Amino acid sequence: MARELTFKILRYDPSQPEIQAQFQEYKLTEKPGMTLFIALNQIREELDPTLAFDFVCRAGICGSCGMVVNGKPQLACKALTKNFNADFPITLAPMPGFELIKDLSVDTGVWMEAMTKRVESWVHTESETDISKQERPVDPDLANEIFELDRCIECGLCVSSCMTKLMRPDFVGAVGLNRVARFYMDPHDDRDASDFYELVGDDNGVFGCMSLMGCEDHCPKEIPLQSKIAYVRRELVKVGLKR
Amino acid sequence: MNIIYSDALIIGGGLAGLRSAVTCADKGLDTIVLSLVPVKRSHSAAAQGGMQASLGNTKMSEGDNEDQHFKDTVKGSDWGCDQEVARMFVTTAPKAIRELAAWGVPWTRIKAGPRTVVMNAKQVKIEEKQEAHGMINSRDFGGTSKWRTCYSADATGHSMLYGIANEAMKRDITIHDRKEAIALIHKDDRCYGAIVRDLKDGSLTAYVSKATMIATGGFGRIYRVTTNAVINEGIAQAMALETGKVALGNMEAIQFHPTPIMPSGILLTEGCRGDGGVLRDKDGHRFMPDYEPEKKELASRDVVSRRMMEHIRNGKGVDSPNGQHLWLDISILGRKHIEEHLRDVQDISKTFNGIDPADEGEKGWMPVLPAQHYSMGGIRTDKTGHSHLKGLFAAGEAACWDVHGFNRLGGNSVSEAVVSGMIIGNYFADYALDASITISTAEIQQALNKQDAYLDALINTDGGEDITKIKIRMQEIMNEKVGVFRNGGDLQSAYDELKELLVRSRNLTLKNKSRANNPELSNAYKTQKMLKLAVCVAKGALLRTESRGAHYREDYLKRDDKNWLKRTLAWWRAEDDIEPDLTYEPIDIMKMEMPPAYRGYGHKDMTVEHKDTAKRLTEIDKIKAENQTVDRYVLQDRIMPFELPMNYKNKNERLGDK
Ligand SMILES: Cc1cc2nc3c(=O)[nH]c(=O)nc-3n(C[C@H](O)[C@H](O)[C@H](O)COP(=O)(O)OP(=O)(O)OC[C@H]3O[C@@H](n4cnc5c(N)ncnc54)[C@H](O)[C@@H]3O)c2cc1C
Ligand code: SF4
Ligand code: FES
């Protein structure tokens, strides 16, 4: 027998502040292989064309669909309904820590662009590359290590599950510190620890992290965020001590 | 009135759009990039497998160069591509990848010494040279003579897109996301930007520019099952078509990828087969060698997809509640390889199907079935990326610049996206530098009002039709009748019904009447546009009475060079038309570097020859005989000269040179 699922979804439209935020319930019959991507689209197609949410790749690759599912921030497109207990409603709320657009849709893009510019998330170098010449060799293990950190999809789950971010709204987040680690390791990037100290050597940066691990527990790409934050902290402490 | 001015307006923030934007910024242009979503979420991020560039670093790619890449690309296209453009592309691809490496893209690198690879389902040891240590690695892909597909594990597109997006942000290029271009502003055969809808509040803005580029990716969502992201709807191609001044080229050339996982249609990369994975049927039999003894699972995509469907028709498909499928087996590569190089594949399969592909034997096999994957067709441009409408350029998957003809090779698309961003981006920027805006505010206002009135009319019409149903029906028709195997009867009925749907889509009743935050309204205008594209695809396919590349007619099995060596151009002459006018652009054999021949895979002796083929072959032989002492670059130039901007024509250095 197909199960009857109840979805309890937090509705709010900041452009209509006179209408209070409230949970709204929808019922659907479960289908085999149903994900929250399929369920939410079905709700929008059949029950409520005004419901707002974001999906792009629907395959856990693009990082668009973070939301809080039964209290836990996760990628909705990868959440299979068969893993939920149908005796209780499935509660969906937008990710905290980002500007709310409407209902389940939040503006991670603006936040991530600001983070990118804050940690200057690009290669800094004085050397010119002649692109018709052979590329510069990179140790294959190091290339893999950088790739591991480069896998971040800017979904924002680490930010929305971070206690420090709750207390310090300007905290750069695990995503930002991971990016620092990534470029610090990259041999193409000439920046040294003191350059990064200028960017994140304060309490809104690497020294703000309270090591509560919320980020690493929720990262869908299983990036070793704690050890990378610790690594950045160690490197920047050395700079701090010298100053 | 909302007007935003810029020198260069780039619609689309995927690989092609962002790379073009970087060039524009470097040339000092005031540049704006528009995107439906934050740019790093563009569908380029979903490319897993890799990027073709003939670096020739690994043992298995020794001897590779532009000539090899060119030949593979032309064969892959089934001689439908523009060979000069293909030359421009293959010459720039190695530069593109080296530029990306310098921008920090973590390409997987070669380790010197022995390594084990899987070839033809057997483990084979190869030895990587010392001097290749640390250089960019490459893997095998379908339809290539060398291992040419460079990769960063299985998140290649992601790493590339982040690399380029970071460069765009470094240059502080203005990016406006959650914006949708819905119409072009044009006057006297010249484009001046676009009318853009804000996806948060529904407001309309005129983005007025000296030059406009469309780099909006593919339109897979006109099909029910597709590997494409939900945002790949082709709205921008349709808005270009709607000007009546822009032709869409080869819309019937649609690629079906052999291995999306069923039933979700999420792609499992070609890297699975490139790295040695095999296809199996209901008896667990590896069937591809029976059909394609030489290239086996690694024939070009059109051929593999057809062979799979053929095998299912022969009664060898696996039954499931969602219909029949076949198996993809990568367990033979070993857990270590999968967890290092095909991790996203494993993640997708585990998450959506509960199958760990690293599990040995049957347990690890993944259910796959060919599905829509790539649009070779798109906005027809010249070699500089300029469309028929002056001031409007197109690049990336949205364009028909025509590297791919009737079938694109795996790994050639992210490569084209970046390379076209470099080449076309450059011509585009130069155009913008010289151009000025000669349209009045009143005319801009008019263009804006027109869209405003259009949206109001959509909301206020009360014709009784339901847009969701129309859209789903369109997608079903495309899936069922304009798929891997095509025939006159099905195509005719698809064509007729699509036209009918287009008429019905003009008589809607929307339940939700709001202009903002109204997914039903966006669905309405989008579906009208998507239907136009669908009709172009169906009509093009119906009239093309031959089989070429991915376009396969069961009632016309031969590639007919005599009558069909030409590109289809679709024009929408008047707004309330319900079908395009098709014209054809000949492809001149006498200018080809590589006249039509057998591809080396697929059925043999299945061409109707063109009289020029033999003539051109003799001519080329003569040029070769007269130029026996020159190097391969000079010889190439004597056979088919081509131009490139910047220093992109410089010789690409390779390990083997020394
Ligand atoms: C699952 C999958 C895997 C793939 N793997 C590979 C691979 O391994 N190798 C390979 O070579 N190719 C691969 N491809 C193909 C390749 O990824 C794409 O062809 C290529 O990335 C397209 O890049 P693009 O820049 O043209 O467009 P996209 O990356 O699709 O970007 C389009 C941009 O346009 C914007 N946009 C669209 N419409 C509008 C509008 N109306 N208004 C404003 N903005 C708009 C979008 O927001 C987006 O920013 C794959 C494709 C898929 C679907
Ligand atoms: S670090 Fe992990 S959780 Fe944070 S944004 Fe990146 S992928 Fe998401
Ligand atoms: S939609 Fe792309 S990660 Fe969920």
Image (cartoon, helix red, strand yellow):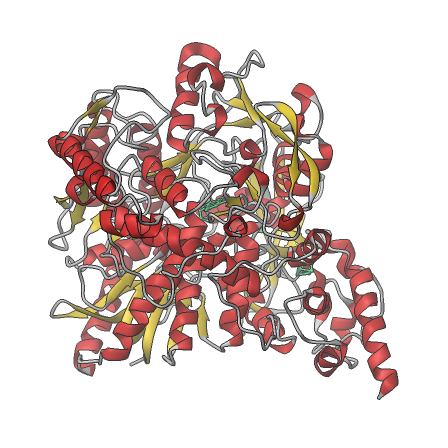
Q: Is residue B299 above or below residue B190?
A: above
B636 or B378, nearer to the observer:
B636
* Outermost residue, right side: A241
Which quarter shows the N terminus of chain B? bottom left
In the image, residue B481 lies at what x, y percent? 29, 28
The image quadrant that residue A79 belongs to is top right
Who's the residue at 29% across and 67% down the image?
B427
B91 or B225, nearer to the observer:
B91
Who's the residue at 43% across and 39% down the image?
B226
The image quadrant that residue B93 belongs to is bottom left
A173 on left or right of B260: right
The number of numbered discs placed on residues in the rendered structure image is 0
Who's the residue at 41% across and 21% down the image?
B307
In the image, residue B415 lies at what x, y percent? 44, 51
- The answer to whether any part of residue A86 appears in the image is no
* Outermost residue, front side: B629
- The answer to whether any part of residue B77 appears in the image is yes
Q: Is residue B494 above or below residue A126?
A: above
Who's the residue at 44% across and 10% down the image?
B315
In the image, residue B585 lies at what x, y percent? 14, 45
In the image, residue B262 lies at what x, y percent? 52, 30
Q: Is residue B84 above or below residue A34?
A: below
A89 or A177, nearer to the observer:
A177
B359 on left or right of B237: right
B589 on left or right of B360: left
- Answer with the quadrant where ligand 2 appears in the image: bottom right
B217 or B321, nearer to the observer:
B217
